[in-house]
Image: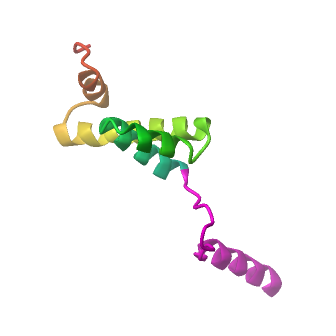
Amino acid sequence: MWGRIRKSGTRFVNAMRIEEQPEGAARTYNLFEAAAAYVSACAEDDQERLEEAAAWVSPEALSFGVNELACRAVIALARERDESPREVARALLGLPAA
């Protein structure tokens, strides 16, 4: 029993550990970092940053991250405006009210 607890604790500690990367090693990015960088670069019309962020993760992961960011942004804006997410999404896209 103690062996399982120790093994589980060791896995948890190893997962939480932040390791220094050797100098010159490529940094790994998660899909949400990539999505945030991609969308902000797109909003600022920065093609160089847009291409860089797109290379951080697979196209599928980037698509998922951008979708998640869009959902969270619409929900936050809807709460701020006290409107439904549907109304906010349509307004952002310039569509008439449904």
User: Is residue 35 rendered to the left or right of residue 83?
Assistant: right
Front residue of this view, candidates 1 and 40: 40
Q: Identify which residue, 87 or 46, lies in the foreground.
A: 46
Residue drawn at (60%, 35%) of the image: 60
The percent coordinates of residue 90 (x first, y second) are 28, 21
Per the rendered image, the range of residues in magenta is 1-30
The one of 25 and 79 positioned closer to us in this rendering: 25
Q: Is residue 47 magenta?
A: no
- Counting labels gives 0
Q: Is residue 11 visible?
A: yes
Picture coordinates of residue 24, whole percent (x, y): 60, 67
**Residue 35 versus residue 97 in the image, above or below:** below
Is 40 on the left-hand or right-hand side of 3? left
Q: Determine the image quadrant of residue 38.
A: top left
Quarter of the image holding residue 48? Answer: top left
Q: Residue at x 30, y 31 (%)?
A: 85
Instruction: Give the farthest residue toward the left.
Output: 81
Q: Which part of the image, by quadrant, shows the N terminus?
A: bottom right
**Quadrant (top left, top right, bottom left, bottom right) of the C terminus:** top left
Residue 61 horizontal/vertical position (percent):
58, 41
Placement of 67 over or under 21, stated as above or below: above
To which quarter of the image does residue 17 belong?
bottom right
Q: Is residue 7 magenta?
A: yes
Residue in the picture at 35% in, 43% down: 40
> In the picture provided, is 71 more to the left or to the right than 51?
left
Q: Identify the residue at horizontal 75%, vertical 84% (top origin).
A: 6
Q: Compared to 87, does 77 lie above or below?
A: below
User: Is residue 96 rendered to the left or right of residue 66?
Assistant: left
Residue 16 percent across, percent down from the top left: 59, 74
